Image (spheres, rainbow, N blue to C red):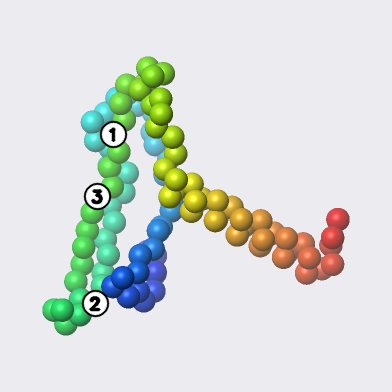
Amino acid sequence: ELWVGDMMSEEHKDLLFRVTMPSCGPIERFAVAKVSLSYYSVPSSAMATAEAVMALRRGQHDGAAGRGAGPDPLISRQRNRLLVASVFQRARELAEPQNFS
């Protein structure tokens, strides 16, 4: 369970997570995760839930199929933010005991 906190209607949050895919051949639809969101709906003045299944398609890899299909820039940006945050955290941990080597 992940608590995101309060959000306004015009806000959005990106949640990045890592999945491990099993070895397999081409498959039309592979369910990676099922997510549900519980929220308070102001228009209906009640709690509501939305659910979705996250699925991937794994095609035949012939070396040319993925040509031109690079990483999603939004995912790369979030991954880089996490990397920078972990580097700053490690630097802080090293600096606290005056360990500057």
- Reading the image, the residue beneath label 2 is 40
For residue 86, side relative to residue 99 (left or right) = left
Q: Where is mark 1, residue-wise?
A: 57
User: Residue 51 versus residue 72: which sits nearer the camera?
Assistant: 72
The percent coordinates of residue 23 (x first, y second) are 39, 28
Measure the C-alpha gap from mark 3 to mark 2.
Answer: 21 Å
* Nearest to the observer: residue 68 or residue 56: 68
Where is residue 5 shown, x and y percent of the image? 39, 74
The residue carrying mark 3 is: 53
Amino acid type shown at disc 2: Tyr
Q: Report, in whole angstroms, how far the alpha carbon at label 3 lies from the one at label 1.
A: 13 Å
* Placement of 28 over or under 71, stated as above or below: above
Query: Which corner quadrant of the image does residue 45 belong to?
Result: bottom left
Q: Give the mark count.
A: 3
* Residue 72 spot, x, y in % from top left: 42, 43
Please, is residue 27 above or below residue 45 in the view? Answer: above
For label 2, count other residues whose C-alpha is less than 10 Å away and answer few (under 14), some (14-19) or many (20+). few
Q: Quadrant of the N terminus?
A: bottom left
Question: Label 1 vs label 2: CA separation?
Answer: 33 Å
Residue furthest top as drawn: 62
Inspect the image, locate mark 1, and give the three-letter code of the amino acid beneath it.
Arg
